[in-house]
Amino acid sequence: MSLRESAADMRDELTRLRHALHRQPELGLDLPRTQEKVLAALAGLPLEIRLGERLSSVTAVLRGARPGPTVLLRGDMDALPVSEHSGAEVTSQVEGRMHACGHDLHTTMLTGAAHLLAARRDQLAGNVIFMFQPGEEGQGGAKIMIDEGVLDAAGERPVAAYALHVISAVLPRGVFITKGGPMMAAADKLVVTVRGAGGHGSAPHRAKDPIPVACEMVTALQTMVTRGFDVFDPVVVTVGSFHAGTVDNVIPEEARFEATIRSFSKPSHRRIQERAVTLVKGIAAAYGLDVRADYQVNYPVTVNNGAEAEFVGATVREVYGEQRFIEAPQPFTGSEDFSFVADQVPSAFVALGACPPDADPGKAAYNHAPGARFDDAVLPDGAALYAELAVRRLGLTPSPAPN
């Protein structure tokens, strides 16, 4: 049987695991129940398993029957602090938590791939690292796993790494999409606190009002982007939080805002860090106010290796047909901590449409929304693609000569 056929036979088992994960979502780096379910799903397979120290990660290594290179497959496991209102048959049983980004599908697909590849261990020339990762949603779990040695778990660095990510809208169900070069944006956070002097709203000249100064910073950041950065190498600044004052007739001492900053190249990523902080400090100085600007570098740009992205496209076309693959015309504006892996290993990050058949991809709730729904029907295809990429990539690299 082909990997695709074998994965199809696992549909019920994969669906049960995904539903179990979806009902009990966990947040951040500490996912004990999720880790327990993953370990149970991997039980009995010929894997070398190591658990994380600073996070509830699972690193599993499958060694082929013959020596060869190493390939890494990654699936993230954490959920979001979102209350589910999807109307799906299976929903979260934990108030205020939801697998709104589909990580439960990724985890399930990766366990499926482990079963598929373990059953073909005698045919493998090389090793496969299965990277079950907590803390993708802002905690940088990938970086922690790298620090704890996931890339060296098989004894040598992988020659390639792959990650799948489902999308609840936009893409038709079952369609894979990727591209070479920048695939996902860098994501940083800017926190600005402007401090002046409070006073009576009727006499602003006797105070130092931080509100108009902070407002000027917000608009100036937008102008800086449009006038200071190439439109073909975009930067996106969105101020999503602004807080100041308590009542209408009191000038507060402090105004505070937070912004997310997205960029798509390493030069722009470096430059926006300096320009944003310099700008808000300059505006504060012009009005004689104090400012504290905390620029937090979170996730770098996720850059797909061109050859690996082409390899993914060729594999999808051969296994699933031309109609199941799209080359992305541009990067996605979301961010990913798989970027830390891609910085060290030739990698490809691949998206998979998982919109249910009764929903219009153009109107369906997108990832992170309380109403986001994902179709279990894509589970076998994701598991099979993970396995196909590992088998085919190991086959492309000659095994080392025996000593």
Image: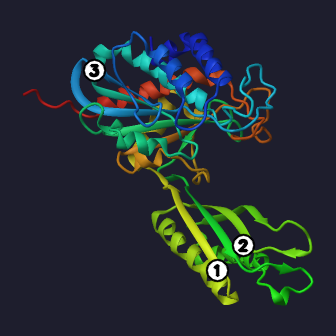
Which of the two residues, 176 or 187, is positioned nearer the viewer here? Answer: 187
In the image: residue 312, left or right of residue 67:
right
Tag 1's secondary structure? strand
Q: Name the residue under label 2.
A: 218
**What's under tag 2, amino acid-wise?**
Val
Separation of marks 2 and 1 at Cα, in angstroms = 16 Å
Residue at (47% x, 68% y) in the render: 270
Residue at (66% x, 74% y) in the render: 221
- Give x and y (percent) for residue 183: 53, 50
Mark 1 or mark 3: name the one nearer the start of the chain. 3
Residue 339 to residue 17: above or below: below
Separation of marks 1 and 3 at Cα, in angstroms = 61 Å
Residue 224 to residue 398: above or below: below
Residue 189 to residue 109: above or below: below
The mark tally for this picture is: 3
Residue at (48% x, 27% y) in the render: 385
Residue at (67% x, 88% y) in the render: 288
Mark number displayed over residue 133 = none
Tag 2's secondary structure? helix
Separation of marks 3 and 2 at Cα, in angstroms = 55 Å
